[in-house]
């Protein structure tokens, strides 16, 4: 709808009035405006000019097409989610790691009833120190005549290693045997190797050695006519200690002699062998366990008079794994 301004209406009335005064008279001719008529005429012309300019200014120039203002998008940086840190796995207080078998590797062969010492090397892989209130304890399997528990001899800090030894004895019958062991803390809780608390173990085989019939024991010593000499001793392929003994001069002595084997200062075997006519081997029946100091002795009680009593024994270090004595 178009709205008209009152000013335009007033101007239109004035113009009509002025035109009415300038209408031609009946007498004819065109009168020349003068006085008030001239004033009205000028006013009408002025109003007409104003109205023309106003109309021109207000006239629409065509349908206006609205334009949409599009705001420029401001680039934004998308924050990538940071990786969630993985918390470190907590180290348990009590935990052990196996390092090696110091003695009696798996499958070591022993005589029935033979004594030995098993030694494990373990590392404290936990976060608590093992004190002397900690102990190695039998867990399952065959105890092999070992004590139920042996306390540690010194403290072991986290990361340190320790050699743990337990005295044992092979069962009396041939066969394969295994004993499982664990550690026990000061509160009495048992723990083993790794997160699964696995046991560490001793694994042996008991073998029946062939029976050797000794000769009759000499009841009265012969006169001092010769000398028994321990030339050497060594290990068989099975680890048994074998002595090589000489009788000098050849066949100067007869009968039999006693022998003894000591391991780490403890007598572990004794028996008798025939006196050789020249030199001969004497099988002792003792099998080396791990690394041991072995002392072999012939005629340990000096029952046979000899010209030299100082050549009847030898001490060597023997390794039950490599079967070497040095």
Image (tube, helix red, strand yellow):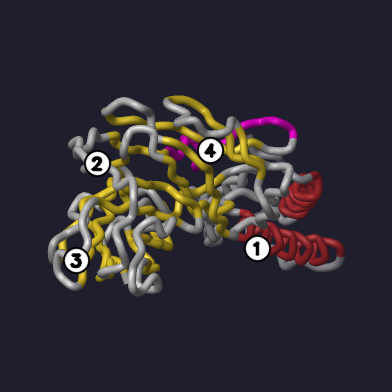
Q: Report the span colored magenta.
A: 187-201
Q: Nearer the viewer, mark 1 or mark 2?
A: 2
Q: CA distance from mark 1 to mark 2?
A: 160 Å
Residue 134 vertical position relative to residue 75 in the rendered view, above or below: above
Q: CA distance from mark 4 to mark 1?
A: 109 Å
Q: Would you say the residues marked 1 and 3 are in contact, meaning their CB atoms lie under 8 Å apart?
A: no
Q: Judge from the rendering whether residue 99 lies leftward or rightward of residue 42; answer left or right.
A: left
Q: Position of residue 187 (x, y in %)?
A: 74, 33
Q: Which residue is mark 4?
A: 192
Tell me which residue sits at (49%, 52%) in the image: 266
Q: Which residue is mark 1?
A: 53
Q: Which residue is mark 3?
A: 252
Which disc number belongs to residue 216?
2
Which image quarter is the C terminus in? bottom left
Which disc number belongs to residue 267?
none
Q: Nearer the viewer, residue 85 or 161?
A: 161
Q: Would you say the residues marked 4 and 2 are in contact, meaning their CB atoms lie under 8 Å apart?
A: no
Local crowd size for mark 2, using a 10 Å CA cut-off: few (<14), some (14–19), many (≥20): few
Tell me which residue sits at (34%, 30%) in the image: 177
Q: Nearer the viewer, mark 4 or mark 1?
A: 4
Residue 180 vertical position relative to residue 39 in the rendered view, above or below: above
Q: Nearer the viewer, mark 1 or mark 3?
A: 3
């Amino acid at each position: 709808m178009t709205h008209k301004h009152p000013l335009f209406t007033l101007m239109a009335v004035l113009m009509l009035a002025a035109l009415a005064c300038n209408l031609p008279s009946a007498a004819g001719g065109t009168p020349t405006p003068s006085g008030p008529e001239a004033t009205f005429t000028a006013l009408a012309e002025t109003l007409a000019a104003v109205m023309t300019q106003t109309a021109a200014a207000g006239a629409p120039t065509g349908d206006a097409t609205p334009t949409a203002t599009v705001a420029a998008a401001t680039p934004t940086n998308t924050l990538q989610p940071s990786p969630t840190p993985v918390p470190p796995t907590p180290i348990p207080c009590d935990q052990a790691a196996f390092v090696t078998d110091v003695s009696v590797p798996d499958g070591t062969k022993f005589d029935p009833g033979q004594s030995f010492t098993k030694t494990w090397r373990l590392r404290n892989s936990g976060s608590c120190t093992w004190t002397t209130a900690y102990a190695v304890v039998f867990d399952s399997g065959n105890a092999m005549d070992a004590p139920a528990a042996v306390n540690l001899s010194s403290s072991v800090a986290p990361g340190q290693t320790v050699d743990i030894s337990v005295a044992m004895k092979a069962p009396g019958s041939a066969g394969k045997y295994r004993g499982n062991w664990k550690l026990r803390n000061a509160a009495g809780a048992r723990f083993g190797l790794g997160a699964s608390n696995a046991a560490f173990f001793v694994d042996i085989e008991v073998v029946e050695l062939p029976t050797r019939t000794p000769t009759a024991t000499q009841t009265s010593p012969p006169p001092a006519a010769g000398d028994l000499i321990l030339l050497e001793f060594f290990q068989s392929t099975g680890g048994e200690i074998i002595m090589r003994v000489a009788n000098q001069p050849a066949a100067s002595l007869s009968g039999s002699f006693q022998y003894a084997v000591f391991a780490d200062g403890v007598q572990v075997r004794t028996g008798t062998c025939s006196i050789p006519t020249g030199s001969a081997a004497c099988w002792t029946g003792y099998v080396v366990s791990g690394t041991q100091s072995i002392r072999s002795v012939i005629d340990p009680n000096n029952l046979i008079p000899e010209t030299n009593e100082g050549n009847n024994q030898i001490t060597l270090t023997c390794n039950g794994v490599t079967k070497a004595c040095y």
